[in-house]
Image: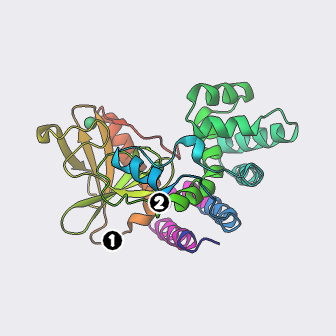
Amino acid sequence: MIEPLDEFYRRMTYRLNQLRQERSELEEILAFYDKVLAAQQQTQRETAIPEIDLSEERLRLKVEEGFPLLGRGDFRVDRDSSRELFQRICHLSMAENPVLAAAGKTLLEVMDTKKLDFVKLTTAVLENDTKAIEAVANDLGVAIPVVQALTKLSLQPFLLASVQAVAQRAAIDDWHYGYCPVCGGSPAMAALVGEEGKKEALCSFCGHFWQLPRLMCPFCGTDRQEDLRYFHGEGDDLYRVYVCEQCRGYLKVMDTREVGDVGTLAVEDVASGHLDLLAEEEGYERKAPRLWGI
Ligand SMILES: [Zn+2]
Ligand SMILES: [Zn+2]
């Protein structure tokens, strides 16, 4: 078992259950997430930190030149246990809303008949090869975001284990880019931490957390202050939406200075889905993939 990760799941589950008490309108998605999280945690406990063959010198050079530590092909995914987790998550989906239930059923059937090439699907999701994901989804008659989300959920424990394998070995504390130092992914969401207004981001791909550069759009890199601003949702002090007029991107940011926890941003991302709608209505675009577009 990887201890820091076990703690991560504990905190995620705690926050999830807190939100389930407070936000009855999110019960359906949060209850499903709770079950998925328990399945992921079990897989995580059975997953060792992999050996990733990159020398300290190579890692140091990458950081120096602003390259992420890992390419998508460097992540180690155990095909058998990711397949098992995928099947478990598909089973869980079958008890959910009609769209998820139908998708879960179809995916389980094609796994059995070997009509689905699972390795090809995981590779497509890892490499964010949208054409290949679309081809699989259309071939099976399952909605694209659902195929993508269920596959990504079954890969997450392995991505987290790979992050653990390298993040401690390189000096990435001073990383000053808008993309993730481990994988190069975009921030899914961020948290305001401490009185100096530091922003810690959650990577939309690998789940690593890093500190965003201040006063800069993480998506296009502009630091023209007149193009950067934020707004709150109505009657909502907990979350802010930072927008950029240059690239029209937006980033949801949770204010954790009084309540909340950076480590549970993945749950906050789901809980603040209303702000994604609001930002899109205002003409801004979510630049990072949304995991729970289902
Ligand atoms: Zn990352
Ligand atoms: Zn921008």
C-alpha distance separating marks 2 and 1 = 27 Å
Horizontal side of 34 relative to 167 (left or right) equals right
Query: Could you tell me if residue 72 is visible in this image?
Result: yes
Question: Please, what secondary structure does the residue beneath circle 1 have?
Answer: loop
In the image, what residue type sits under mark 2? Ala
Where is residue 44 shown, x and y percent of the image? 65, 64
Q: Is mark 2 within 8 Å of ligand 1?
A: no
Where is residue 178 shown, x and y percent of the image? 32, 45
Residue 250 — which label? Answer: none
Horizontal side of 126 relative to 189 (left or right) equals right
Does residue 242 sit above or below 170 in this rendering? above
Residue 167 — which label? Answer: 2
Question: Please, what secondary structure does the residue beneath circle 2 have?
Answer: helix
Where is residue 43 shown, x and y percent of the image? 69, 62
Residue 128 is drawn in which quadrant?
Answer: top right
Pick the front one: 240 or 281: 240
Residue beneath disc 1: 259
For the record, the magenta segment spans 6-33
Residue 103 is drawn in which quadrant?
Answer: top right
Q: Which quadrant is the N terminus positioned in?
A: bottom right
Does residue 126 sit above or below 173 in this rendering? above
Pick the front one: 55 or 151: 55
In the image, what residue type sits under mark 1? Val
| Residue 30 highlighted magenta (yes or no) | yes
Residue count near mark 2 (Cα–Cα under 10 Å), binned few <14, some 14–19, many ≥20: some
